[in-house]
Amino acid sequence: EDKVVQSPLSLVVHEGDTVTLNCSYEVTNFRSLLWYKQEKKAPTFLFMLTSSGIEKKSGRLSSILDKKELFSILNITATQTGDSAVYLCAVGDMDSNYQLIWGAGTKLIIKP
Amino acid sequence: NAGVMQNPRHLVRRRGQEARLRCSPMKGHSHVYWYRQLPEEGLKFMVYLQKENIIDESGMPKERFSAEFPKEGPSILRIQQVVRGDSAAYFCASSPSRTNEQYFGPGTRLTVT
């Protein structure tokens, strides 16, 4: 059965710290891995990764995919209170109409 | 360029009534996805539609739930004879193709009393 597992489930750090969120997956026919940020509203798209080893970067956020070991990490440097959110990982499976299989999310709390 | 629109944002229904949730995808997007999210839980896929076609409804309960995406107008998620367990946030997402990232609407929070 396809699955996406995120860790940790929750994380509390202080402003300025760097955090690394993990997403591992098992899908039949991998197409892409996506990261979203969800505050108290709809998920907002962060990154889509399809190739191994190529880092995607946006400001203080970056992400990389390892298709051999079947995982991705999302890094946030110099965290701010506005980074507090649930970070969701989803994987597209070509064998399931490209349906996205979602992880449960990592709840990140940044303390001032 | 307007994002994904959903309405209503909040909907209160009594047990046994019908709930109709609407979703207008982003301009140029012909693929629509509906998700349900319970408090403190992850997103659960319900149904994937293209214009006039249901592509995948494997996540949608067989009874009381239906979805459509007509040639003209928004996509509709319809829940008949609602029960308390249907209370959740229902998100719609759209994409220009099935291989692209999905963009989410603000969601409809359904409360069944």
Image (spheres, grey):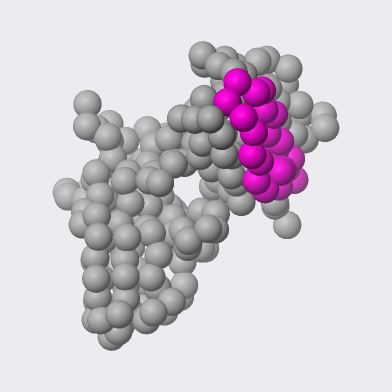
**Residue A80 point in image, percent of width and height:** 52, 25
Residue A63 seen by the camera = no
**Residue B33 point in image, percent of width and height:** 40, 50
At 77% from the left and 35% from the top, the residue drawn is A70
User: Which residue reaches farthest left?
Assistant: B72
At 28% from the left and 85% from the top, the residue drawn is B16
Q: Is residue B97 above or below residue A107?
A: above
**Residue A50 point in image, percent of width and height:** 63, 25
Q: Is residue B17 above or below residue B89?
A: below
Q: Is residue A37 left or right of residue B72?
A: right
Q: Main secondary structure of the magenta part?
A: strand
At 17% from the left and 50% from the top, the residue drawn is B73
Q: Is residue B54 above or below residue B13?
A: above
Closer to us: A36 or A9: A9
What range is drawn magenta here?
A5-30
Quadrant of image for the N terminus of chain A: bottom right
Q: How many marks?
A: 0
At 38% from the left and 70% from the top, the residue drawn is B87
Q: Quadrant of residue B70?
A: bottom left
**Residue B81 point in image, percent of width and height:** 30, 82
Q: Is residue A53 above or below residue B67?
A: above
Q: Is residue A9 magenta?
A: yes
Q: Is residue A3 left or right of residue B63?
A: right
Q: Quadrant of residue A15?
A: top right
User: Which residue reaches farthest bottom?
Assistant: B16
Q: Is residue A33 left or right of residue A24?
A: left
Q: Is residue A43 left or right of residue B50?
A: right
Q: Is residue A31 magenta?
A: no
Residue B61 seen by the camera = yes
